[in-house]
């Protein structure tokens, strides 16, 4: 019985601190992620990436239908592309 208690104490001596360290790491990483996501520049970065991806999608879709759209930088260019794409859908009878 004494060896079992010593063995249990030895296991707890290693397991408990490791569990606490993992819990602290999880809490700190979630706090850091929350802080980074709340920063304004991160939102601008995500918006910029989405705009670039959307521009490429609109360009690809438009060029596949034979309508070439030149996209400049900025959000208004994306909106212009969408308007042109919608207009070309109506013009070529692609409206669903």
Image (cartoon, rainbow, N blue to C red):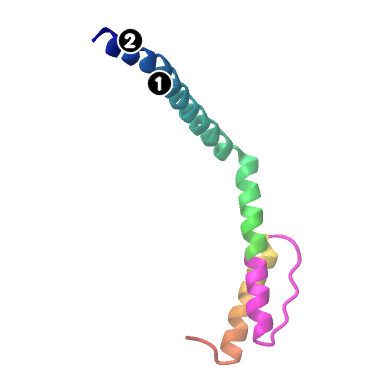
Residue named by callout 1: 15
Residue named by callout 2: 6
| The one of 50 and 70 positioned closer to us in this rendering | 50
Residue 13 position within the rendered picture, expressed as x and y whole percent measured from the top left? 40, 14
Q: Residue at x 36, y 16 (%)?
A: 12
Q: Residues within 10 Å of mark 1 (few under 14, many from 20)?
A: few
Q: Secondary structure at mark 2?
A: helix
Name of the residue lying farthest toward the top:
2
- Closest to the camera, between mark 1 and mark 2, is 2
Relative to residue 39, is residue 72 drawn left or right?
right
Q: Residue at x 66, y 54 (%)?
A: 48
Image: magenta residue range: 54-74
| The one of 28 and 36 positioned closer to us in this rendering | 28
Q: Secondary structure at mark 1?
A: helix
* Quarter assignment of residue 87: bottom right
Residue 81 position within the rendered picture, expressed as x and y whole percent measured from the top left? 66, 73
Residue 84 visible in the picture = no
């Amino acid at each position: 019985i004494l060896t079992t208690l010593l063995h249990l104490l030895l296991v707890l001596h290693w397991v408990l601190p490791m569990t606490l360290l993992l819990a602290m790491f999880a809490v700190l990483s979630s706090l850091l992620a929350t802080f980074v996501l709340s920063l304004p520049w991160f939102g601008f970065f995500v918006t910029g990436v989405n705009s670039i991806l959307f521009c490429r999608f609109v360009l690809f879709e438009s060029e596949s239908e034979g309508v070439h759209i030149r996209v400049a930088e900025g959000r208004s260019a994306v909106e212009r592309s969408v308007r042109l794409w919608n207009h070309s859908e109506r013009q070529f009878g692609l409206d669903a």
